[in-house]
Amino acid sequence: MAKQYWLMKAEEEAYSIEQWKKDKSIFWDGVRNYTARNFMRDQMKKGDGMFFYYSNGKPSGIVAIGEVVKEGYPDHTAFDPKDIHYDPKSDPKKPTWYMVDVKFVRACKQIVGLDLLKKVPGLKNMKLFKESRLSVSPVTEAEWKIIMKMIDAQ
């Protein structure tokens, strides 16, 4: 299967780029949207590229590049009553929620802001703009190449 590309969102307060640099590889937990879950469970593959996007930032935008290093597996935080992502309806025998592991590749020299992304003609159909509430969304190969050129030109 061909390499795929993704945009994964987090709020800076929840998980910072600085922390990801230190951790190097993390599990991407706490996704509680069925569409985003399905992407992680069924489609994300080891070696896929991903953009780390700060949502609700000033500005919101892409802050780093990563890579999927472990394919979808049950999100254990859903089973822990002490975790903020606990879901009492999720059953370890038939998990509802999944996560993937992603490794840090590199940070952007500066944020690639949402306002800038919206102005680029080749990005006008990005899922980010059409389904803005999704915390995990696919990025086409053409969109990936355009954004990578923007990042490399910084």
Image (cartoon, rainbow, N blue to C red):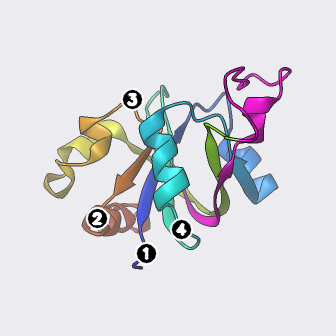
- Mark nearest the camera among 2 and 4 is 4
Which residue sits at x=74%, y=41%?
A: 93
Identify the amino acid type marked 1: Lys
Count of picture labels = 4
Identify the amino acid type marked 4: Lys
Q: Is residue 48 magenta?
A: no
Query: Which picture quadrant has residue 75?
Result: top right
Label disc, if present, on residue 146 of the rendered structure: 2
In the image, 124 versus 44, the foreground residue is 44
Label disc, if present, on residue 45 of the rendered structure: 4
Q: Are marks 2 and 3 in contact (CB under 8 Å)?
A: no
Q: Residue 145 placed where, x, y %?
A: 32, 69
Label disc, if present, on residue 3 of the rendered structure: 1
Q: Which residues are magenta?
A: 64-93
For disc 2, the neighbor class at 10 Å (few under 14, some 14 to 19, many from 20) is some
Q: Are marks 4 and 1 in contact (CB under 8 Å)?
A: yes
